[in-house]
Image (tube, grey):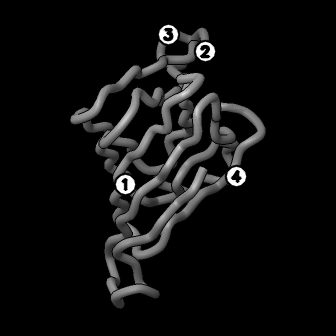
Amino acid sequence: MRRLAAISGSSVGSEHIWMGQTHVAPDTASSNHHHGASETAIHVVKGHPEFVFLDDSSGTPEEIRLRTAPGDYIFVPPYVPHREENPSPDEEAVVVIARSTQEAIVVNLPELYVLDEERPAGN
């Protein structure tokens, strides 16, 4: 995956937002991760990337897969574990990402869940 910053603290001096593109090669998946206290908004520009989240609201953990198309928007709340995938064997996926922090925060996880000690008290 190639992440390209467009708006960031280092590029334009922003203090409360980060924005850029991610290019996801065919047949690629990110690691499981979250973006800390940052809210993340994603706009699909090209391809059909998939976003995988864990839903344990029923007591039985289950992966939820959001299949997208160009023009779709995805919201990822703070500390929510997820991963991005591009299942296409031959088409790159391109997404525009905006985050509520000035820099991109990526906390890799061994599984699709947040360890209790990673989340600050009260969140």
Q: Which mark is residue 97?
A: 1
The amino acid type of the residue labelled 4 equals: Glu
Q: CA distance from mark 2 to mark 1?
A: 27 Å
Q: CA distance from mark 4 to mark 1?
A: 27 Å
Q: CA distance from mark 2 to mark 3?
A: 7 Å
Question: With respect to residue 84, does 119 lie above or below?
Answer: below
Tell me if residue 98 comes above or below residue 34 in the rendering.
below
Binning the other alpha carbons within 10 Å of mark 3 as few (below 14), some (14 to 19) or many (20 upward) gives: few
Residue at which label 3 appears? 58
Q: Disc 4, disc 1: CB below 8 Å?
A: no
Residue at screen point 53% across, 23% down: 88
CA separation in Å, label 3 and label 1: 30 Å
- Whichever of callouts 3 and 4 sits on the residue coming sooner in the sequence is 3
Q: Secondary structure at mark 2?
A: loop
Which element type, helix, strand or loop, lies under badge 4? helix
* Residue, disc 2: 61
Camera-nearest label, 2 or 3: 2
Q: Residues within 10 Å of mark 4 (few under 14, many from 20)?
A: few
Q: Earlier in the sequence, mark 3 or mark 1?
A: 3
Q: Residue at x 46, y 87 (%)?
A: 10
